[in-house]
Image: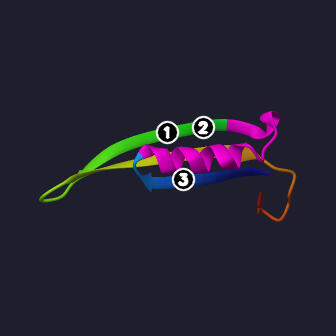
């Protein structure tokens, strides 16, 4: 079964850390692809960076859930 897990955070460090922790629970051959996107959202006084990392992976679990 193919699954998708998304990590969305303000700033890159938190999303990166969570994605790396998740990837450490997978075998190399389970990882199909990793997508990364970043953007800025402007408010009146500040600008926020938003990061999104999406991991596309394969699991043998037929229930559709993968919990590390």
Q: Is residue 61 placed above or below 12 in the rendered structure?
A: below
The residue carrying pointer 3 sits among few (fewer than 14), some (14 to 19) or many (20 or more) residues within 10 Å by Cα, namely some
Q: Nearer the viewer, residue 35 or 9?
A: 9
State the CA–CA distance, disc 3 to disc 1.
10 Å
- First of labels 3, 1 by sequence position: 3
State the CA–CA distance, disc 3 to disc 2.
11 Å
Residue that mark 2 sits on: 34
The label shown at residue 14 is none
Highlighted range, magenta: 12-32
Residue that mark 1 sits on: 36
The residue carrying pointer 1 sits among few (fewer than 14), some (14 to 19) or many (20 or more) residues within 10 Å by Cα, namely few
Q: Provide the major secondary structure of the magenta segment.
A: helix
Proximity of marks 2 and 1: CB atoms separated by less than 8 Å? yes
Residue shown at the point (72%, 44%) measured from the top left: 57
Q: Is residue 41 placed above or below 31 in the rendered structure?
A: below
> Is 26 part of what is drawn in magenta?
yes
Residue that mark 3 sits on: 7
Element on which disc 3 rests: strand
Residue shown at the point (33%, 44%) measured from the top left: 39
Furthest residue in direction left, as rendered:
44
State the CA–CA distance, disc 2 to disc 1.
7 Å
Q: Where residue 61 sits: x, y (%)?
A: 86, 57
Q: Is residue 44 placed above or below 24 in the rendered structure?
A: below
The residue carrying pointer 2 sits among few (fewer than 14), some (14 to 19) or many (20 or more) residues within 10 Å by Cα, namely some
């Amino acid at each position: 079964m193919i699954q998708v897990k998304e990590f969305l955070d303000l700033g890159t460090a938190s999303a990166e850390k969570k994605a790396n922790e998740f990837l450490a629970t997978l075998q190399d051959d389970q990882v199909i692809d990793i997508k990364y996107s970043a953007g800025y959202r402007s408010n009146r006084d500040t600008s926020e960076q938003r990061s999104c990392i999406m991991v596309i992976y394969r699991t043998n679990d037929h229930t559709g859930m993968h919990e590390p």
